[in-house]
Image (cartoon, rainbow, N blue to C red):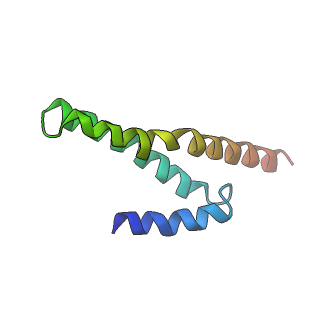
């Protein structure tokens, strides 16, 4: 269910990511907190470390594009305030 909700948000953000930057921020936070939760669980022996491979392809890969979108949104907001 969470994946479906994220999908709806991402669909809105895909049309105008600068305008919908809060959705992108929520996505980035999820992609940061997910790996932290994984490391925590793996360090406690609750999950095998091999599952970390999934973190590379599902979470870490998104850090760069989400961050770039958020930086562009920040620049856009500053430009509009200066105008």
The residue closer to the viewer here, 53 or 21, is 53
x, y percentage for residue 9? 51, 65
In terms of depth relative to the viewer, which is nearer, 21 or 1?
Answer: 1
Q: How many numbered circles does the render carry?
A: 0
Which residue is outermost to the right? 83
Whole-percent x, y for residue 78 in the image = 75, 44
73 in relation to 17, above or below: above
Depicted 66 relative to depicted 1: above or below: above
Quadrant of the image occupied by residue 43:
top left
Indicate the quadrant containing the N terminus: top left, top right, bottom left or bottom right.
bottom left
| Horizontal arrangement in the rendering, residue 83 relative to residue 17 (left or right) | right
Image quarter for residue 2?
A: bottom left
Residue at the outermost left position: 45
Q: Quadrant of residue 74?
A: top right
Compared with 77, 53 (above or below) is above
Residue at horizontal 34%, vertical 38%?
A: 53
Residue positioned 74% across, 42% down in the render: 75
Q: Position of residue 38 (x, y in %)?
A: 27, 39
Residue 21 position, x and y percent, is: 60, 54
Which of these two is toward me, 81 or 27? 27
Horizontal side of residue 19 vs 9, given as left or right: right
The residue positioned 68% from the left and 55% from the top of the image is: 18
Q: Is residue 5 left or right of residue 51?
A: right
Which residue sits at x=59%, y=43%?
Answer: 65
């Amino acid at each position: 269910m969470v994946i479906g909700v994220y999908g709806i948000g991402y669909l809105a953000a895909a049309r105008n990511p600068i305008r919908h930057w809060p959705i992108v921020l929520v996505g980035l936070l999820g992609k940061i907190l997910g790996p932290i939760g994984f490391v925590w669980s793996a360090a406690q022996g609750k999950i095998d470390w091999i599952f970390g491979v999934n973190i590379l392809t599902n979470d870490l890969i998104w850090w760069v594009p989400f961050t770039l979108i958020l930086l562009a949104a920040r620049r856009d907001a500053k430009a509009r305030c200066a105008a």
